[in-house]
Structures are given as structure tokens and as C-alpha cells.
Image: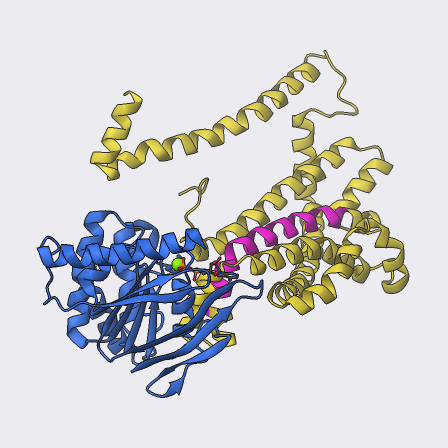
Amino acid sequence: MLQVSAIGKVYQNGTQALEDVTLTIDDGEILGIVGGSGCGKSTLLRLLSGLDHATTGAVSVDGVTITEPHPYIGLVFQEPRLLPWLSISDNVGFGLIEPDTVLKKRRIGEALEKVGLSRYGTSSPKELSGGQTQRVALARALITRPRVLLLDEPFSALDAFTRVELQDHLLDLWNETRPTLVLVTHDIEEALFLADRVVVMRQHPGRIAETFEINLPRRRDRTSPEFETMKREILRSLNTTLTLHKIA
Amino acid sequence: MSATEISLTQALNPQRGRTPITKPRSNSIWLGILLPLFAALLWEASVQTGFMVGRLMPPPSHIIKTLWNLWQSGELTTHVIATTLRVFAGFALGAVIGTLFGALTGYSMLMRRLLDPALQALRAIPSIAWVPLFILWLGIFEASKIALIAVGVFFPVYLGVSGAVQSVDRKIVEVGRIFRLSGFELIRRILLPAVLPSYVIALRSGLGLGWMFVVAAEFMGASEGLGYLLVDGQQLGKPDQILAAIITFAVIGKLSDSLLAAITAPYLHWEDRFGRDT
Ligand SMILES: Nc1ncnc2c1ncn2[C@@H]1O[C@H](COP(=O)(O)OP(=O)(O)O)[C@@H](O)[C@H]1O
Ligand SMILES: [Mg+2]
């Protein structure tokens, strides 16, 4: 269980990025986080990942407080952030600690196969498309079998077709080991398609505005009326946070 | 074949498409040689026909003959080896110290604030100004020469390494942090490969300065070396010997740079930059 207890974050320049955010995320849950730009979504993920420290409050996994990156917690950044000097295979295996080279090779092969890039093991990152490099980033994060995977707008730089394809793919991967997923996105449809629960955030300072339980059965039909209804509700909530901000 | 046709062939058949890319490259070598070759031939012809006097500016045939004689007597080899050893020793010393200080100041803000102002102040001193002091401290033989060359090599290497370490993308460092790399592993697996391309450039400009400074060092008084050939040629009024030494400098300078580039090339194959050949 991932427990976020009343965390706040003030950056060194005085920006209050987050204030009093409390969340409990169950094992195996997919949590979607949506919100306008600058409302602290990336900050929240950085605190969850241990890359950054909260100013107030704490984050804990199964009762253990997170103060630095933790082996249970993986992170996929908005950009692929592959290491250009490594082959695709070596990028995927970058964080895998496995002294047995044969075993390591096999694990990398499996991970590549899962994201459909078996043929590209020896390629270099510059030879892959945007969608493919983001798949590699996904494989790199998943190969260590994290129990919590944080994703910061992982598909936002991709075209609509690739995005939908990767959303399906992410769901398949999740189905295999059912890790906890925390997915930040600015695409309401993406959150709705994937998440059990969608948190809408508002800004100045970043806070949770509203939470939606999504009780639609998976695999969700993006064109069903129920899907549309939920989408409209979340959109309305998002708009409220934005207008509230304008009035304030 | 028109331009669109070429790009079409390339798109349809990358293997065949490569030919038009490599061809201009081998052509460009000849293109680069054209101008000096023409100038040399023109000079040769003007002297041969008696149109010009080649006493102070000897014609190419004369210089080649001098080079050949120096080579035959074994003198050229002696001088080249003496100079190359000096450059090599000075380069090694300057590069090692420059790398050390560059890494320290690039990695640690505290070290940067502590060391960089002093080093920048030293850099402002024209390096040749150190010569009298080095001679007083280290004598007139090899030590003072190598010290001067090392000073010349130090600054480009120091600046290059420090700047390269500072400008490593924070985003890539975070990849290392998320996988919990220790300090040493972070340096080995992230920082080192990331700075390597700039490091090679820094080393190459350091080596270039090494070749510049060896001349100054050998002007300080040497009994062998290409710098000695220059001084000797001036004192005895032998312009052909001076030009022979200059040409030798150009050749071994270029050779050593190409060697450095070739040694490091396998580690840089991943670079994805505009203007990169291959
Ligand atoms: N390193 C930083 N230093 C100072 N302010 C920051 C830093 N990172 C983010 N911020 C500020 O914190 C707020 C939230 O940023 P962020 O978490 O990136 O938002 P989001 O990901 O939702 O767009 C913004 O106002 C942003 O300008
Ligand atoms: Mg963000």
C-alpha cells in the first residue's frame, strides 16, 4: 500500500508546488492523476519516487518511509531518457542487477518481447521512433519488477494512434503482474481508459480538487455512453479548477 | 541523375543510396589539396624559369631535397623523436592534471568556487611569461620544457572537462538515481560516457596547443628537436631547413591528432549530431 500523508512541497525559490495532499493507493490499483499544467503532478511523482523530498508530510510504502529511490518503485519519465551510448538491450537492462549474464540476457529478451521490440535489441536509440523509445523506457522500468510504477505523462509526446496503442499495451503489461500504477496525464480519456480512480488536481498551490471512482468494466470502450458521461464529469471538474484559479 | 531521383533511390534502396554520400567525401580530399598543389607548382615554375629568386623562399623541389637529406642522415628522425617525446610527456602531464581539476570543479560546486577563480586568473597570464621562472626553477633542460607544454595543454583540458561535467543533462543523471546507482557507479555509467565526446574535443585542442608550446619550449634552447632545426636554420640562413621543419610539424601534428581521433572514435559511435561524418 502506498500512503501519501499530508505532503507539501515548497521549492527553494519559494514556489509552493503542493499543499496538504493525502492519498491512499491500494496494491494493484491504477490511479490516474489529471490537472492543468503546473498544478504539481510531476512534483507529486518525484516525491513518490524518492527523487525529491517533501517539505512537510511523508510518503510510505508498506509502512516504510520513502526518502530516496526505492527498489519497489519504478518511474517512467515524460521523455524516454534512454542513454544514447547504450544499445536498446543495454538500456532495457540498465537497472537490472543480475550477476548471471545468461539470465540477464534472457530477462532483457523477455522484456523486449513484451513491448514488441525483440528485433531491435542491438539497435541504438537514435534509430527508433518516438513510440518505440517510449516502449523501451517502459521495458526498462518494468524489468526490475517494481511493485509500484509511476508514469509521468508517458505518452503525451506521441501521436493519437500510437498513444491508444500504448495504452492498450500498458494494460496488458499491468495484467501480468498487477503492479500499482500511478499515471499522470493531461489526457482525460487516457485516465478514464486505464484508471480505477481518477484524481483531479488544482493549482496554486497544487491540491486534490476531486476524486472519481471509475467503476466501468475493463477493457473499456472509449465510445460507450458511460465512458462519455464520466469523461464529461471529469472535464467539468477540471474546468471548475481552472475557472476557480482565474477568479482567485 | 537529378536531386529528387537520388533521394528516391536512397529511400527505396538505402544500400545503394550510400554511394552518393561517400563519393563527395573522397572527392573533397582532392579538392582540398588542389589549392596548395597549384601554389607549389606555380612557385616551382617561377623559380625554375628564373622569373623569381628562390633564395629566401626556396621552391618545393629544394625543400623536398633538404627533407630527404635530413632523413638520409638520420637527423630528421632524431629531431622528430625528441620533439614528439616532449609533446607526449607535456601532454600527458597537462591532460592528467587538467582532467583531475576539471572533474573536481565540474562535479562539486564547492570545488568550483574554491579553485576556478584562481585557475582563471592563472589562465589570463600569457603562458610564455612563465618561461623565465620555469628556467630558474627547473633548469634549462627537459623539465622546464615539459612544464611549459603541460601548462599549455592544461587549460583547454581543464575548461573542457569542467564544462562538460557541469552540462551533463540532469534528466539522464536522474535515470541513474532512480535505479539507485552509488556515487562511483553514477560516475562510471552515466557521467563518464556522457562527457566523453566533449572530453575528446578538449584533449584534441590540448594536444594542438602542446604542439604550439613545444616550439616555444625548444626556442628556450635545445640541442635537438624540430624547434632547434628552426632556430638553427635562421642562424645559419637556411630557409629550406626552416620550411622543412615547418612541414614536418604540420605532418606529425596532423598525424597525432588523427591518431587521437581514431583511438577514441569507437567510444563515440553513438553520437547523433549534425556534421558528424560516417
Ligand atoms: N525545480 C523546481 N524549482 C522551482 N519551482 C519548480 C520546480 N519544479 C517545478 N516547479 C514549480 O512547481 C509547480 C508545479 O510544477 P510541476 O510539478 O512540474 O507541475 P505539472 O507537472 O503538474 O505541470 C509549477 O509552478 C512549477 O513552476
Ligand atoms: Mg509535469
Q: Residue at x 62, y 21 (%)?
A: B39
Q: Is residue B11 magenta?
A: no
Q: Residue at x 74, y 50 (%)?
A: B214
The image quadrant where one finds the C terminus of chain B is: top left
Ligand 2 is in which quadrant of the figure?
Answer: bottom left
Q: Quadrant of residue B234?
A: top right
Stretch in magenta: B189-215
Please state the horizontal and vertical placement of residue A135, each as a whole percent of the image. Answer: 26, 59
Q: Colour of chain A?
A: blue
Q: Main secondary structure of the magenta part?
A: helix
Q: Residue at x 61, y 65 (%)?
A: B103
Between residue B180 and residue A231, name the one nearer to us.
A231
The colour scheme of the drawn protein is by chain
Please state the horizontal and vertical placement of residue A168, each as a whole percent of the image. Answer: 16, 60
Q: Residue at x 18, y 76 (%)?
A: A177
Please state the horizontal and vertical placement of residue B138, each as a whole percent of the image. Answer: 85, 64
The image quadrant where one finds the N terminus of chain B is: top left
Is residue A90 visible to the viewer in this orientation of the structure? no
Most extreme residue toward the front, as rendered?
A247
Q: Is residue B255 above or below residue A2?
A: above
Q: Colour of chain B?
A: yellow
Between residue A136 and residue B160, name the one nearer to us.
A136
